[in-house]
Image (spheres, rainbow, N blue to C red):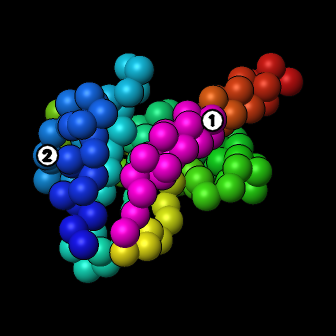
Amino acid sequence: MDLNKLMMEFLAEEGFRPHETPFGIAFKSEGLNFLYFKDEEDEQYFRLMMPAIFVVTEDNEDTVLSVMNDVNGTIKVVKLYTMDMDDEDGKTEKSVWVAFEILADTTPELNDIVPRAIALLRSARITFLAKLEEVADH
């Protein structure tokens, strides 16, 4: 089984217009960016991510980490964490990423997995941003 190939074919068939990146397969859904990470070491590892949904700064880091922890404890299969990435100017920027991670069987039904993964990622993003706003209002 080549899960990476299956994912590329599935996304193309569903009209997502996927394209290869050094990290995996990127595509958009309803204006939001998604990234399917390849794992050459584990053919059954399925990781779909919503990258860089919120920028982390020194001023907001404690609040962001607290809200991430809260969301991680309430939405199954999805987890939020921070990643450092270099921007166009070579500066490192920390941001929140949302990941959907599972171990797929040897004959994965991507029709069942991908739509639910996208829905859970969207839900986690909405929940995270709403909780951040709630904390900021108090």
Q: Residue drawn 63% across and 29% down?
A: 126
Is residue 44 shown above or below 3? below
Residue 65 or 29: which is nearer the viewer? 29
Tell me how far mark 1 sits from mark 2, CA to CA: 26 Å
Residue 1 or 90: which is nearer the viewer? 1
- Residue 30 coordinates in the image, percent (x, y): 41, 20
Q: Is 10 left or right of 108, judged from the image as shown? A: left
**Is the stretch drawn in magenta largely helix, strand or loop?**
helix
Q: Is 74 left or right of 11, judged from the image as shown? A: right
- Residue 28 coordinates in the image, percent (x, y): 32, 29
Q: Quadrant of residue 59?
A: top right
Disc number placed over residue 33 in the picture, else none:
none
Is residue 60 shown above or below 111? above
User: Callout 1: helix, strand or loop?
Assistant: helix
- Residue 115 coordinates in the image, percent (x, y): 48, 40
Residue bearing the label numbered 2? 20
| Magenta stretch: includes residue 117 | yes
Instruction: Tell me which segment is drawn in magenta.
Output: 107-125
Q: Quadrant of residue 86?
A: top left
Is residue 90 shown above or below 7? above
Q: Residue drawn 28% across and 45% down?
A: 10
Residue bearing the label numbered 1? 123
Amino acid at dot 2 = Glu
